[in-house]
Image: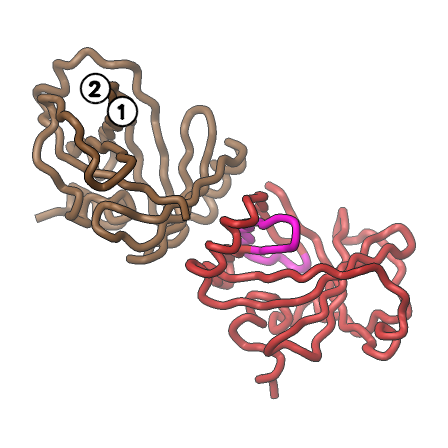
Chain colours: A red, B brown
Amino acid sequence: MPTEIERKFLVDHEKWNSLAKPKGNVYKQGYILSEEKRTVRIRVTPDAAYITLKGASAGISRSEYEYTIPLNEGNEILENFATSAVEKTRYNINYAGHIWEVDVFAGDNKGLIVAEIELESENEPFEKPEWVGAEVSHDNRYTNASLSVKPYKDWD
Amino acid sequence: MPTEIERKFLVDHEKWNSLAKPKGNVYKQGYILSEEKRTVRIRVTPDAAYITLKGASAGISRSEYEYTIPLNEGNEILENFATSAVEKTRYNINYAGHIWEVDVFAGDNKGLIVAEIELESENEPFEKPEWVGAEVSHDNRYTNASLSVKPYKDWD
């Protein structure tokens, strides 16, 4: 079973903004099904679209099945099958042998910047860049599925 | 938008059983999401698996997005993401220039045999083989999604 092992952190906005970085890509993600133990997501990027199924989380691990689909069909599915959505710009940052995926959210989640690192095993060591702040791996409010229905602007 | 245009008929069991036919294939189908206007289905056949999204029906037409996925992942998704399922043997029968897909259901739907014909347009003419009986295109009880939660054996 394909498993995603991932840790998630907040980002220091000031340090992030002053960082020299590659161009980001706009990601639109819609949720077709969003339950605690089963998520079906459509992701549309500038180059391709993906349909992704994610299972229940066990700590920082989660089963994940992802399939590339035609871009135009991804847009149609996003429009017609998703019941909630998020939009963000994703930056891939190489640092000390790992890739950090940094998501700068837009729309109702504007003001939120989150950095994720995907690991091969739960205990794999890694170095944190100085712009990476507090860990939020276990805070479900930061899942994109949750952000699509309870966006950052509505948090207390 | 990819559209499926399909008519569905009951099958005369006696005539069907006496028919010389090619080998059928076992299809296992699970439903990850099953609503009137949005269905997410996983189908596992002997050779491949498919993830399929179907939209709302408009008469005999329905939007349909289908993607081939690895067989082993299809089985895992069927096991871990589907909340209901059907099992059937499918036969593809060539007749008068069309392919009839005949589903002989098993399990809780045993005793049900249904024939479908896919059309290019809603008014496309076609010939019916003599083993094809009453049309049930508009009877939602015969959708596989419905049969997975209210199987034939439980019908009044």
Q: In the picture provided, is A143 more to the left or to the right than A9?
A: left
Q: Is residue A44 magenta?
A: yes
Q: Residue at x 61, y 88 (%)?
A: A156
Say if A112 sits above or below B72 in the image. Answer: below
Is B26 on the left or on the right of B68, as rendered? left
Name the residue rendered at 25%, 24% in the picture.
B98
- The residues bearing labels 2 and 1 have C-alpha atoms spaced at a distance of 6 Å
Residue type at tag 1: Ile
In this image, B105 relative to B12: left or right? Answer: right
Residue at the spot of label 2: B95
Q: Residue furthest bottom?
A: A156
Q: Which residues are magenta?
A: A43-60
Judging depth in this view, the residue of A75 and A32 nearest the camera is: A75
Tell whether label 1 touches label 2 (CB within 8 Å): yes
Query: Mark 1 — residue?
Result: B99
Q: Main secondary structure of the magenta part?
A: strand
